[in-house]
Image (cartoon, grey):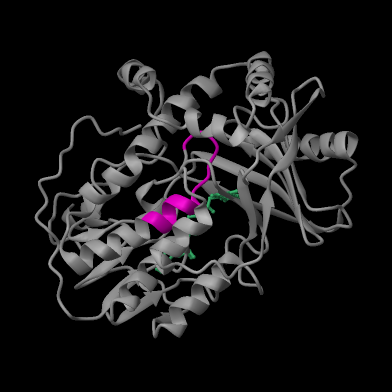
Amino acid sequence: MTVIKTPTSTTAPLASSKGTVQIAGAGPAGLAAAITLARAGRAVVVHEAKSGVGHRFQGDLQGLENWSGKQDVLETLRRQGITTEFDRFPGVKGTAFDAWGKAYKVQSQKPLFYTVERGPGLGTLDTALLNQAQNLGVEVRFNSHLRQLKGDGILAAGPQAVDAMAVGFHFETDMENGFWVICDNNLAPKGYAYLLTMNGIGTVKSCMFSDFKQQHVYVQRTVAAFEKRVGLRMRNPRPHGGIGNFRIPVSALHGQHPIVGEQAGFQDTLWGFGMRHAITSGVLAAQSLLNGHDYNQQWRGALSKQLLASVVNRIFYRNIPNLGYRWFLRYATQQEDVREFLHRFYTFSLFKRLSLPWLNPFYKSRYNELHCEHKTCICVQCRCEESIA
Ligand SMILES: Cc1cc2nc3c(=O)[nH]c(=O)nc-3n(C[C@H](O)[C@H](O)[C@H](O)COP(=O)(O)OP(=O)(O)OC[C@H]3O[C@@H](n4cnc5c(N)ncnc54)[C@H](O)[C@@H]3O)c2cc1C
């Protein structure tokens, strides 16, 4: 894993012209950037390779995490100028299970996260962001796969490698809204299995961090475990899966273009929560284009401590066996408020600072950074090395 050792930013402030800004990718990161630019009066064109927003998610339920900041994430979005006009369910009470089937009540006064729907449908996060962007005059070009980006632009093209994989089903259900988690390496190696339900739909997944080739086995076991433990009821189950890519880049500039969201690798390395970082980095990149600030400094200031803490958390988590998960669940759920506990857990404490240099060699993202040294590089996904050869 590439982890920042010292601030290496020597990049000159990005030039802010008045021309149209091109954005590659209409995920949360790209749309948050577009919204921020359009609110400041800049002309923006967002290119989206697929025929609609959230194409890789198609009705997936995901958790917009609410523990990494003290402020409620919805309030943060409002302050960032980003819409909160999407359907959501506050996760304040749920259940986690260890590998032996023991249940632990997970509860907090404030939501631990908000369940949101992803994809092109009504009420999804992606549709809300798209609507806000278009209402502000952003032009979104679908079926537009951008290979090169000239002039002012932002790279928001999503994951570039597979560090984790979440695989399972989407379905309709008569189950009540809720969330359930199982920490068991036999269901999700080095990860966790989860079930989310909201407004008559659901998602059940094995979120695995290794042994991807056996994914069908883990999915079968995950479904069976949720049927047994919580009475999972699925109607019309549709297979769904996706990949996640986590890393802390040395620089999130490619040529002169800021890289945002998962294309930069910004994601919680422990459990794969990426939406919040995607939106924040999109907003910061847009602001850096508007005011000429150094984007590398901006994202490091806002994100790097949490990202580094999540790397340390991952190294510990992936090395503990099922007994360790049991201890973790017992300890976490004995705390008065699990949200407060997770907030502390994601703090880059003195202990984490001191352990990082020792632990760092034990974690490496599968992404091979294709950093070219060309200040003028215009590739969306860098192919410079090919053209030099
Ligand atoms: C199954 C699954 C479950 C998840 N659950 C959670 C969760 O519970 N909570 C959470 O916070 N995060 C979760 N994540 C992670 C989260 O979805 C991502 O971190 C987030 O969507 C990243 O946003 P993004 O805008 O960076 O990238 P994306 O959402 O991937 O958007 C990138 C867009 O760019 C487009 N694109 C790619 N290349 C080009 C190109 N050259 N030109 C034009 N367009 C291009 C793509 O089609 C895509 O629409 C999950 C991920 C998966 C796969």
Seen in the image, is 323 located left or right of residue 67?
A: right
- For the point 68% across and 22% down, the residue is 334
- Image quarter hosting the N terminus: top left
Residue 31, by quadrant, is: bottom left
Q: Is residue 106 above or below residue 117?
A: above
Q: Is residue 77 left or right of residue 124?
A: left
In front here: 268 or 212?
Answer: 268
Residue 272 highlighted magenta (yes or no): yes
Q: Position of residue 175 (x, y in %)?
A: 87, 52
Using the image as rendered, state which of residue 218 and residue 339 is in the foreground. 339
Tell me which residue sits at (14%, 49%) in the image.
373
Whether residue 146 appears in this view of the structure is no
Res 185 → quadrant: top right
Q: Position of residue 105 (x, y in %)?
A: 75, 31
Residue span colored magenta: 269-280
Residue 212 location, quadrant: top right
**Is residue 385 in view from this perspective?**
yes
Q: Point out residue 19 in the picture as x, y percentages from the top left corner.
A: 20, 81
Asked if residue 59 is positioned above or below residue 306 in the image, the reply reads below
Q: Horizontal placement of 369 versus 314: left or right?
A: left
- Percent from the top left, x then y, of residue 304? 33, 39
Q: Nearer the viewer, residue 341 or 248?
A: 341
Q: Is residue 224 in the magenta section?
A: no
What residue is shown at x 12% (from left), y 57% (from top)? 375
Label total for image: 0
